[in-house]
Amino acid sequence: MAHRTLPMANITIALSGRLMQELVQAAREADTTEAELAHKAIECLVQAHRGPGIPRFARRLGPLALAEDDPSAA
């Protein structure tokens, strides 16, 4: 089955002045546009939503360290 490309869609969002200023600054520092930065952020959010979730029992454990990060594991 051939992959069909969907047409681009536009959305409008409202941001606080502070958040918009931070977005402008982040885009300037990344040498990109605010729209491209927002697009990348939404892609990351959607990808994370599709990914495996954290099991309910593990949520209260907090972040787990890798053995290589723990000097006492050597």
Image (cartoon, rainbow, N blue to C red):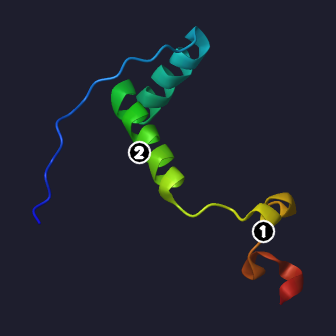
Q: Where is residue 31 in the image (x, y as percent from the top left)?
A: 37, 33
Look at the image and tell me whether residue 7 can be seen.
yes
Q: Where is residue 48 in the image (x, y as percent from the top left)?
A: 52, 53
Q: What residue type is labelled 1?
A: Leu
Report the residue that reaches farthest toward the bottom.
Answer: 74
Report the residue that reaches farthest toward the top.
Answer: 17
Look at the image and tell me whether residue 31 can be seen.
no
**Which disc number belongs to residue 64?**
1
Q: What residue type is labelled 2?
A: Glu
**Which secondary structure, mark 2?**
helix
In this rendering, is residue 72 above or below 30?
A: below
Q: Name the residue under label 2.
A: 43
Give whichever of 20, 53 is nearer the camera.
53
Give whichever of 70, 63 is nearer the camera.
63
Give whichever of 74, 58 is nearer the camera.
58
Name the quadrant of the C terminus.
bottom right
What is the CA distance from the residue labelled 1 to the residue labelled 2?
25 Å
Q: In this view, does 51 lie to the left or right of 18?
A: left
At x 57%, y 64%, the residue is: 52
Q: Where is residue 62 in the image (x, y as percent from the top left)?
A: 83, 60
Residue 11, by quadrant, is top left
At x 46%, y 21%, the residue is: 24
In this rendering, is residue 42 above or below 62?
A: above
At x 73%, y 81%, the residue is: 68
Report the residue that reaches farthest toward the right.
Answer: 72
Name the quadrant of the N terminus.
bottom left
